[in-house]
Amino acid sequence: MRLFRIGLFTDVYFPSKNGVSTSVYLLWRELRKMGHEAWIIAPDWPDAEPEDGVVRVKSVPYPFFEDYRLGLPNARLLPTRFEVVHSHVPFTLGLWALSLAQKWRVPHVSTFHTHYEKYAHYVPGLAFLDRHTHIIPRLARAFYNRVELVITPTHPVKELVERYRIERPVRVIPTGIDTELLARAPKPEPCPWPKGRRRLLTVSRLGKEKSLDVALRAFAQHRSPSQTWESQTSQSSKSHALGPGGTSRDSEAHAPSARTPRDQTGRRRSSDQAGGSRRKYWNSRWKGSRNAAIMDRDPRPGKAHAF
């Protein structure tokens, strides 16, 4: 098997914990295990520590999303001339990857990780502009139609790429799962989930783009119309939402129920009472949960906290 020098260009990487960071790290780790000379090119962070195989370029904070930084390309920092370029986000470093691949005349593979329209609220005015001009699909076509291969993690994302009318070949390659990490997770004793009760669980960052409100509306439809939210959940089922990130406003806006909760008499509670209920919900379900630590996992060696 021929071994390659591969550059993984990503605008999102640790210490920012999210799905793209994890996907890039696991890909880099497995490429290294196979013998390839793989490098990650990512933005620098104030608290980022030096890592083998990771090149940090100077970056500046993105003012509208605290967990994101804009990387500034600098060719002098590149460790080698890559034979394969793999971009992961079509922003500053993704555009740099596109330029380098064309300059060096080497294959450029790009992973289309997610539904970019759902992140439009992080750019002031973009959601409004996209509704009237479809600017996001147009920008996506301009980028991805210039690569050799588009990778998607799921078939629904592949269908989205096709709806964008991106004409390059598309392959579905699911993001790998670190099975060793899951195997080390202990089973809590005693089990906090009593027998005979259904548990509805959603795990993600608590951001608007994760559509937690959809899960909560589904849970609201699941309950019996004759029962209040409190009596329903105390007797037959419980809903849990675990995940870091998101503003307190996001969290309170998504907290159960999808409608204003009823009190024990069946009457709607006031907005102040409902807000208190929402705050208690997140405090109990996220901040106070011993199992919530699994959501803050960093899969890199020496970086993961103990369960």
Image (tube, grey):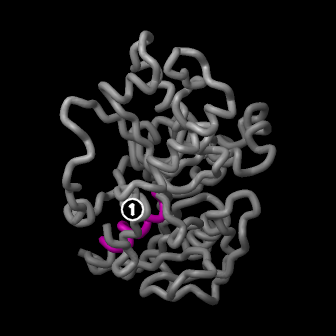
- Left or right of 177? Residue 195 is left
Name the main secondary structure of what is drawn in magenta: helix
Instruction: Tell me, yes or no, whether the highlighted magenta stretch contains residue 29.
Output: yes
Does residue 121 appear left or right of residue 158 in this picture?
right
- Quarter in which the C terminus is drawn: bottom left
Q: Which residues are magenta?
A: 19-30
The picture places residue 201, in percent across and down from the top left corner, at 37, 39
Question: How many numbered discs sit on the rendered protein?
Answer: 1
Quadrant of the rendered structure where residue 182 is? bottom left
What element does badge 1 sit on? helix
Query: Label 1: few (<14), some or many (≥20) within 10 Å?
Result: some
Residue matched to label 1:
293
Which residue appears at 35% of the width and 34% of the height? 200
Locate the N terminus and report the quarter of the image it occupies: bottom left
Q: Residue at x 74, y 57 (%)?
A: 64
Compared to residue 280, the image places residue 216 above or below, namely above
* Residue 303 in the figure: left or right of residue 166: left
Q: Amino acid at mark 1?
A: Ala
Percent from the top left, x then y, of residue 212? 52, 38
Quadrant hosting residue 94: bottom right
Q: Do we see residue 148 in this rendering? A: no
Q: Is residue 49 magenta?
A: no
Image x and y of residue 32, in percent: 32, 78
Percent across and percent down for residue 105 are: 54, 71
Q: Residue at x 44, y 43 (%)?
A: 241
Evaluate whether residue 11 shows in this view: yes
Residue nearer the viewer, 147 or 13:
13
Q: Nearer the viewer, residue 179 or 5?
A: 179
Residue 299 occupies quadrant: bottom left
| In the rendered image, the vertical position of residue 235 relative to residue 241, given as above or below | above
Q: Is residue 230 left or right of residue 236?
A: right
> Most extreme residue toward the top, as rendered?
226
